[in-house]
Image: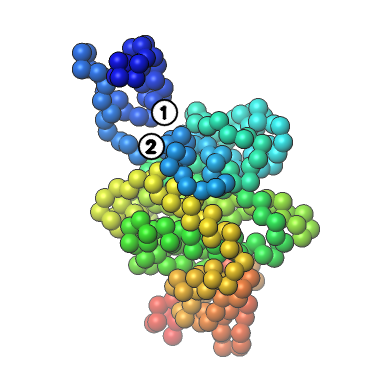
Amino acid sequence: MAARLGISRAAVWKQIRSLRKRGYKIESSTKKGYRLAGNYDILDADMIRSGLKTQWLGKDLRCFSEVTSTNEVARTIARECRSDAINRIANCTARIVKGTANCGAVDETANDGTVILAEIQTQGRGRLSRSWASPPGGIWMSLILRPQISLDRAYRINMAISVAICKALADLYGLAAGIKWPNDLLIDEKKICGILMEVSAEVDRLEYVVVGIGINANVDVSGYPAEWRSTSLGQELGRGVSRTELIQKILLEIEKSYRHMDSKEIWEEWRSRSITLGRQVRISSVSGDLLGRAVDLAEDGALMIQSRDGLHRVLAGDCIHLRALEAA
Ligand code: BTN
């Protein structure tokens, strides 16, 4: 290896040591050399960036071995690290990050499009203050976005992102994921992906948006409680997937649909992939429960519910798909 690369044996050893630190399993044998063994599916920022075809999204991409929540890390970076404060990142995230940050040489000051990934989240968060199981093997990822749109358009980001992930799953694996309002991705009624969007805004101006994406990629969901109704890509495909390839594809699709998030096409694509429209649903929100039929999705993301007492616009809440019998 040293001869082929024209470097010393010590230099080879140094590189091997650094790869091992990053999680690669490399066997060594006297006189034979080194061999890459075991699990290739580790999250490595350089590896992900090397095949990333986006123009701006994920050019600043950081992989952590363990964090509380990638959304928390992303929010901290978005809030604290706006200008010349890269050195502060290490300090400000020390509380929420364990392990080595595997970062690349990038423009650390521009965080529109920064992507945070972690192998494990210890306090992964879901919508409606639920917790989100985040064992190794999943994709736990947050994006920092700074769109120039007003607050009332923020839901278009949600739409663009759920459509983009559906496309990525269809193109890579031929899987038809449906969108359950507002933004759960389901395969055969079982959840494969959840999205948690957190917005920081001043009056009517969006300051930044953190979009957290959780995908049960190579996660063993067999031990999850049945009521979670979860599935994983591994379970659906009967094999593990390359998270690196999937992350690259998702980021590319997100970049494309984000560019057109205000277009009619994204809205129509969302509706065509919806598995909520046409169903009897129960929406639970702070204002109580609403039972009815989901008849349409408004352009601002509101779900239109036809109930016994009329048509309702619902902007937030927990949506439960009812079975025919339950609905009756
Ligand atoms: C939901 O369906 O309730 C949303 C789940 C969102 C989970 C992701 S995993 C990455 C990011 N970090 C978090 O703590 N949550 C989101």
Q: Residue at x 58, y 72 (%)?
A: 264
Q: Which residue is mark 2?
A: 42
Q: Which mark is residue 22?
A: 1
Q: Answer few, some or many: residues within 10 Å of disc 1's Cα (few below 14, many 20 plus, some between 14 and 19).
A: some
Label 1 within 8 A of ligand 1 by Cβ? no
Viewport quadrant of the N terminus: top left
Label 2 within 8 A of ligand 1 by Cβ? no
Residue 265 place in picture, x, y as percent: 54, 71
Q: Is residue 229 visible?
A: no
Q: Residue at x 62, y 35 (%)?
A: 107
Write down the quadrant of residue 41 in the picture: top left
Comes first in the chain, label 2 or label 1: 1
Q: Relative to 3, is 290 on the left or the right?
A: right
Secondary structure under tag 2 reads loop
Q: Relative to 190, is 141 on the left or the right?
A: right
| Between 319 and 237, the one nearer to me in the picture | 237
Residue 47 place in picture, x, y as percent: 42, 36
Residue 9 place in picture, x, y as percent: 33, 12
| Between 141 and 314, the one nearer to me in the picture | 141
